[in-house]
Image (cartoon, coloured by chain):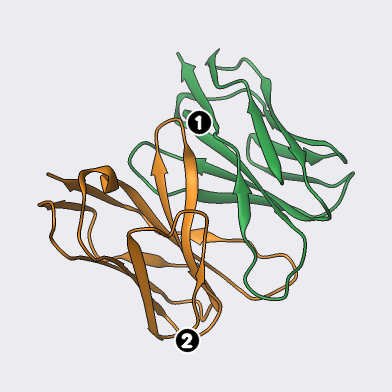
Amino acid sequence: DVKVTQSSRYLVKRTGEKVFLECVQDMDHENMFWYRQDPGLGLRLIYFSYDVKMKEKGDIPEGYSVSREKKERFSLILESASTNQTSMYLCASSFFTEVQTQYFGPGTRLLVL
Amino acid sequence: EDQVTQSPEALRLQEGESSSLNCSYTVSGLRGLFWYRQDPGKGPEFLFTLYSAGEEKEKERLKATLTKKESFLHITAPKPEDSATYLCAVQAGSTGTASKLTFGTGTRLQVTL
């Protein structure tokens, strides 16, 4: 079974704090993705990576950065958390094949006060 | 721009009352269409990948079908445990690197006794 894990299920942070969200997959997937999910807006892609040290911007990268130092691990960094970054954050991974089924982690619900 | 529209937004069924969820898409060069199930507060769980028009896939009470313009998720004799939000997503275009998925906003299904 594909397994994608995320470092925390719930996080509470203060405005201005630096926040690290970590994702680990055990299926040797090349691709990894970070989304946020908000009511009424659906899933929105923040950043993705197709290889170690490679990253590409998604649809809403502002205020975020990412790091991929190992194939199985993809980190999302909020450099200075703001209240509008309160959201559910979802990590996903997939093989680099013609049709790329993505498998999701359990999500991290982040509250920024 | 790729678009995915799901209908209805919400659906309430009685146990045993079969129905269908719709996913209409507008994409340039469909590579794959995906169905996910999402329980409240959790990450999406993969259900099906459909590759080409005419394809059908089944899993327990769920059957997914695909045409050139839309996909249906048929739920036969649903049970309360089928209550969840069902998400549809499409992958289109080039697969030079990791491919972005375009998600619909989901259909929230409630099955009552």
Instruction: Where is residue B99? Give x, y as percent.
Output: 65, 65
Identified at 79% across, 39% down, the residue is B65
Q: Residue at image x 39%, y 55%?
A: A90
Residue at the (50%, 31%) spot, across then down:
B82
Left or right of residue A95: residue A99: right
Mark 2 Cα-neighbour bin, 10 Å: few <14, some 14–19, many ≥20: some
x, y percent for residue B88: 63, 41
Pointer 2 with pointer 1, Cβ within 8 A: no
Q: Residues within 10 Å of mark 1 (few under 14, many from 20)?
A: some
Point out residue B19 in the picture as x, y percentages from the top left corner: 67, 20
Residue A68 shown left or right of residue B95 in the figure:
left
Residue type at numbered disc 1: Asp
- Give the letter of the chain under mark 1: B
Q: Amino acid at mark 2?
A: Val
Q: Quadrant of residue A30?
A: bottom right
Q: CA distance from mark 2 to mark 1?
A: 38 Å
Q: Chain of mark 2?
A: A
Q: Please tell me whether mark 1 sits on a helix, a strand or a loop.
A: helix
Name the residue tied to disc 1.
B82
Position of residue B88 relative to residue A32, above or below, is above
State the residue position of label 2: A52
Q: Is residue B13 visible?
A: yes
**Which part of the image, by quadrant, shows the C terminus of chain A?**
top left
Q: Which chain is green?
A: B
